[in-house]
Amino acid sequence: MTLFEIFAVMLTTFILVVLSGSDTQQSLILAIIIASTAVVWNYIYNTLFEYWERRKHIQKRTFLIRSIHAVGFEGGLTVVCLPLYMIWYGVGIWMALTMEISLTLAFLVYTFLFTLAFDTIFALPHQTSTLTER
């Protein structure tokens, strides 16, 4: 998680510098705030989501359930982040939304590539024989 977040902060800082035209230090501070917010929101959201699953007696996380989970998580994070961008950079709602959409799309690719690399480097014990056989 730490490695993921370190790279995430670097990626977020870069994107915010490009989109806002601000300096690296200002964007780095906001990137750390956003990463911290995402970690806390992740814990809160997953706790609430799992409570909802238990109450509804959800037995399997289907594609629909996973989709609801992803949209809910990103929606909640957006509600928190939009005002941060607006206050931090003094921008309007549309620019803040552009920042959030850009970061969300970048994180979609980043998360996929990070987990792909992680799974390749740190294969599970039962997967190592399969990887070496190829």
Image (cartoon, rainbow, N blue to C red):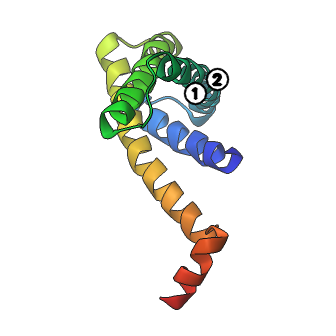
Please state if 65 lies on the left or on the right of 5 as rendered.
Answer: left
Task: Read off the residue under disc 1.
Answer: 42
Within-10-Å neighbours for mark 1: few <14, some 14–19, many 20+:
some
Residue under label 2 = 40
Q: Position of residue 124 (x, y in %)?
A: 63, 67
Q: Which amino acid does label 2 sit on?
A: Val
Question: Which residue is drawn at the image coordinates 61% and 69% (left, top)?
Answer: 123
For the residues labelled 1 and 2, say whether their Cβ atoms are less than 8 Å apart. yes
Q: Residues within 10 Å of mark 2 (few under 14, many from 20)?
A: few
| CA distance for labels 1 and 2 | 5 Å
Q: In the current view of this chain or complex, which residue is farthest to the right?
A: 2
Q: Which residue is pictured at 44% across the width and 42% down the height?
A: 107
Q: Which residue type carries mark 1? A: Asn
Quarter of the image for residue 13 reads: top right
For the N terminus, which image quadrant? top right
Q: Where is residue 16 in the image (x, y as percent from the top left)?
A: 47, 33
Residue at (32, 26) in percent of width and height? 98
